[in-house]
Amino acid sequence: MTVLALTTLRRPDQFADWYRIGADYVLEVAEGLDLALGDFPTLADEATEAMRAGRTDVRAELARSIAADLYADAAFCEPYLEWTPLWYELALLAPVRYADARLRRVAGRYASDLGHVSVPQFSRPKDVLVGGRPAFTSVSGFRNRFLFADALLHVEWFVHVARESGIEVPESLVARTRRETVEWYASGAEDPAALSPEVREFQRLLFADDRWVRRIDEAYELDSVLFSIWERILREERERLTG
């Protein structure tokens, strides 16, 4: 099977593991940053159980967390592809859009009774500038662009899902991380010591998304070569940041 298999998912119970894996990622990063978790650990357990039972009639806190995770994943991929070489973007655009539609449909079943639901707007290459020019123009090669995109977009993903799940992420850390991340990856620097200790640790924790990729691959029995490549690239970057 391949990533195309994800387009067959339709029901809340089929996305329970998907939500759980995302929730565990949020918890791991938040714990690593020593953020106050509030009720999120219990909330994530309840939300997962409800999804596995196919229930959508859940209290607002659960519905918001589920919707935030699935909507963020749905909104993530297409902007991400814009950072990659054109051949890669064109190859994945159709299946990505179809899988995103599945995620939005299930998310909508949990969001329908909420007064307001936020959907993150992820950075596009033309919006991220260094010296007045798009930052990605100084980055060449699939691997480097893939990592630049992930380093920026997974900050935005985490902040959105964490805050919608009741975890406050300091804005000063977010702003500093964005600024240093863009400058570092755009410069092509190799030594992570150029990043401030707080930003380096935040990015090291966020690059645990290699484990997110592996767990999705295993949970949905994809046996995907593409996922294996993503996992390896992300794992190597996490190890580089670990030093």
Image (spheres, rainbow, N blue to C red):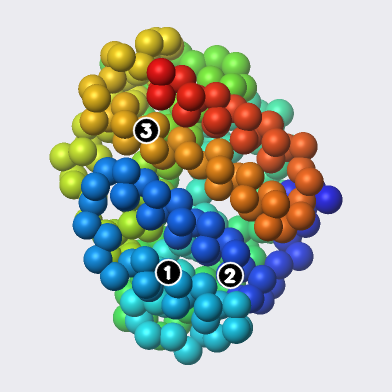
Residue at figure coordinates x 52%, y 63% from the top left? 20
Please name the amino acid that badge 2 sits on.
Ala
The earlier-in-sequence mark between 3 and 1 is 1
Q: Residues within 10 Å of mark 1 (few under 14, many from 20)?
A: many
Q: Quadrant of the C terminus?
A: top left
From where the camera sits, is residue 192 visible?
Answer: yes
Tell me the residue that label 2 is attached to. Answer: 16
Residue 133, image x and y in percent? 36, 19
Give x and y (percent) for residue 203: 37, 33
- Residue in view at x 42 percent, y 69 percent: 44
Instruction: Give the percent coordinates (x, y) of residue 160.
Output: 34, 55
Position of 203 relative to 154 (above/below): above
Check disc 2: other Cα within 10 Å, few if <14, some if 14-19, many if 20+: some
Q: Nearer the viewer, residue 14 or 115?
A: 14
**Element under label 2?**
helix
Placement of 118 over or under 139, stated as above or below: below
Q: CA distance from mark 1 to mark 2?
A: 11 Å
Position of residue 14 relative to residue 124, above or below, is below
Residue under circle 3?
203
Q: Outermost residue, bottom direction?
A: 57
Query: Splitting the image into 4 quarters, where does residue 233 fall?
Result: top right
Residue 44's tag is: 1
- Quarter of the image for residue 141 reads top right
Element on which disc 1 rests: helix
**Do tag 2 and tag 3 residues touch (Cβ < 8 Å)?**
no
